[in-house]
Image (spheres, rainbow, N blue to C red):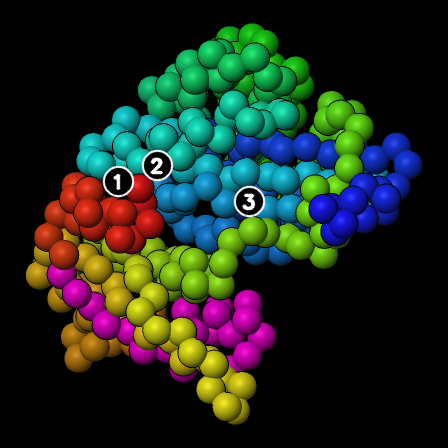
Amino acid sequence: MDDFSELFEETPEDHHSGFVAVVGRPNVGKSTLMNALLGQKVAIVSPRPQTTRNRITGILTTDKMQVAFIDTPGIHKPKHRLGKFMVKEALAALPDADLILWVADVSRPPREDDQRVASALRAQHLPVFLVLNKTDITPPDKLTAHRDMFRALIPQAAEELAISALHGLGLDELLQKLYDHLPPGPRYFPPDQVTDIQERFLVAELIREQALNFLREEVPHAVAVSIEDFKERPNGAVYIEARIFVERKSQKGILLGKGGHMIKRIGSEARKAIEAELERPVYLDLWVKVKPKWRRDPAELRRLGYA
C-alpha cells in the first residue's frame, strides 16, 4: 500500500490516466501503432495476419498523462481453438477499458472481420476512436470513400483520426485527443515501466516473430514457441533453450530448411533481437518438434499459454 500511495503523491497536477484497448481485425497495424506510441518495441510485428495472440500491455508515461495500451489479437472468424482463444482475448479487453481505439486499414474498404469488430464495439458503452491507419498508401479518393464506409459502421465514434503508424503520422494529435478524453487520475505504474510482460514471454515472442518473418503460407500460423530453459551464466550471458512446435512433419522440414539453413537464420536473427532487449549476450538453443493439431488441443493450448 505504501508504494501505491507514493505513486499518487508523485502524480503531477492536471494529470490524466486510463486504460486504452487497441482493437481491430487482423493485420491492420495495431501492434505497430502501440510500439510507435511508446517509442520502443513491446509487441512483435510481421506482415502475417494474426501475429498477436495474447493481450499485451504497453505503458506510456509523460509529464501530463499515463496510458496503459492493451494491444489485442485481431478479431476474426476463428477456425480452431487457438483462434477462439485469440478472439476471446480481444473481447475481454473491452469492458475494463476507459477508451477504445478501433484501428482500421483505410487503404481497403471494410471487410467482414471489420464488421465483426464494429458489432462488438456497438455493444460497449465506451468512447471509441476510429483510427484510420495506413494513410501513407491510400490515394485521397479512396481515403474519403473508405473513411465514410468505416464511419457508417460505428456512428458513436467519439473521434476520427487519419494516421500512419508505420511513419508516425498523426500520432501527436492522437495522444492529445487521448489526454482530452481520459479522466484525471494517478499513475498506476512506475514512470519507467513500459510493459507488464515477463522476459520468458518476450523471448518466446521474439523467436516466433522471426519464424513469421522467414516462413510462408500456413507454416507461420502453425508455429508455437516454448521456453524450456532460461539461465544466467557466471559470465553474465543468458542460456536459452526453446522448442518451436509445428503441426506436421512437412512443416518441420520447412522450418529446419536444407542442412538446417532456415532454423539457423531464424535463430541468428532471434538471438540479435533478444540480446537487444535483454542487453546481455545470449546463447540460443532451438529445437523443432511436431505436435499434431496443437491449435485444436485444449491441453496443449493451456501448456503453451493460450487458454
Q: Amino acid at mark 2?
A: Met
Could you say where residue 33 lies in the image, as x and y percent from the top left?
A: 57, 42
From the viewer's perspective, tell me whether residue 273 is left or right of residue 304: right
Is label 1 in a helix, a strand or a loop? helix
Q: Amino acid at mark 1?
A: Leu
Is label 3 in a helix, a strand or a loop? strand
* Mark 2 closeness class: few <14, some 14–19, many ≥20 residues within 10 Å: many
Whichever of callouts 3 and 2 sits on the residue coming sooner in the sequence is 3
Q: Give the residue at the far front of this rendering.
A: 1
Residue at image point 42% right, 27% down: 91
Name the residue beneath numbered marker 1.
82
Are the two marked residues, 3 and 2, in contact with CB atoms closer than 8 angstroms?
Answer: no
Rendering quarter of residue 193: bottom right
Name the residue beneath numbered marker 2.
86
Q: Nearer the viewer, residue 69 or 306?
A: 306
Could you say where residue 155 lies in the image, as x and y percent from the top left?
A: 56, 8
Q: Is residue 277 above or below residue 301?
A: below
Q: CA distance from mark 3 to mark 2?
A: 15 Å
Is label 2 in a helix, a strand or a loop? helix
Q: Amino acid at mark 3?
A: Thr
Are the two marked residues, 1 and 2, in contact with CB atoms closer than 8 angstroms?
Answer: yes
Could you say where residue 265 lies in the image, as x and y percent from the top left?
A: 33, 73
The residues colored magenta run 268-290
Could you say where residue 262 lies in the image, as x and y percent from the top left?
A: 26, 71
Q: CA distance from mark 3 to mark 1?
A: 20 Å
From the viewer's perspective, tell me whether residue 265 is left or right of residue 41: left
Residue 286 inside the magenta-drawn segment = yes
Name the residue beneath numbered marker 3.
57
Q: Is residue 159 above or below residue 280?
A: above
From the viewer's perspective, tell me whether residue 186 is left or right of residue 81: right
Residue at image point 40% right, 74% down: 230
